[in-house]
Amino acid sequence: MIVIGGDDQYRDEDEEELTVISRWARRKVASQFNEECLDGRKSFIFSWNKQHREIHEEALLHYFDPSKKGQKFEYQPKPKPEPKKIENNDEVWQPKLNLLSLSLVILS
């Protein structure tokens, strides 16, 4: 297993979230390794910028699962939760913080 840290060459957020290695890093190392070492059948080569992501954790679970030995890793992203909608038209009250009035209260 190889990890390339500091990889900021991802094309966009989708590529970063859906692949274990950026296309740029893959092109740099692909000629040195068999495809089985890149896709999880025998090993993995990961890259990330500042920290690992969910896809890397899922890939490791796949790699260490004895029932998946020799199988290619295919990431199935979890669906993102939809934003909550307000059922009625009533305005939801949310307190607003006014720093000026807060500082006046503290000073008095």
Image (spheres, rainbow, N blue to C red):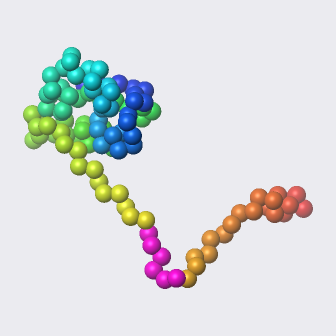
Q: Nearer the viewer, residue 11 or 20?
A: 11
Q: Position of residue 84 (x, y in %)?
A: 44, 69
Visible residue check, residue 84: yes
- Magenta span has 87? yes
The secondary structure that most of the magenta stretch takes on is loop
Q: Position of residue 38 (x, y in %)?
A: 20, 28
- The residue depicted at 9 percent of the width and 34 percent of the height is 70
Visible residue check, residue 53: no
In the rendered view, tell whether residue 80 sits above or below residue 47.
Answer: below
Q: Which residues are magenta?
A: 84-89
- The residue depicted at 18 percent of the width and 39 percent of the height is 73
Q: Position of residue 1 (x, y in %)?
A: 25, 25
- The residue depicted at 39 percent of the width and 40 percent of the height is 12
- Quadrant of the snapshot with the C terminus: bottom right
- The residue depicted at 48 percent of the width and 76 percent of the height is 86
Q: Is residue 8 left or right of residue 64?
A: right
Quadrant assignment, res 68: top left
Q: Is residue 44 left or right of residue 101?
A: left
In the rendered view, tell whether residue 106 sits above or below residue 24.
Answer: below
**Residue most toward the top?**
32
Q: Is residue 98 left or right of residue 81?
A: right
Q: Position of residue 51 (x, y in %)?
A: 42, 35
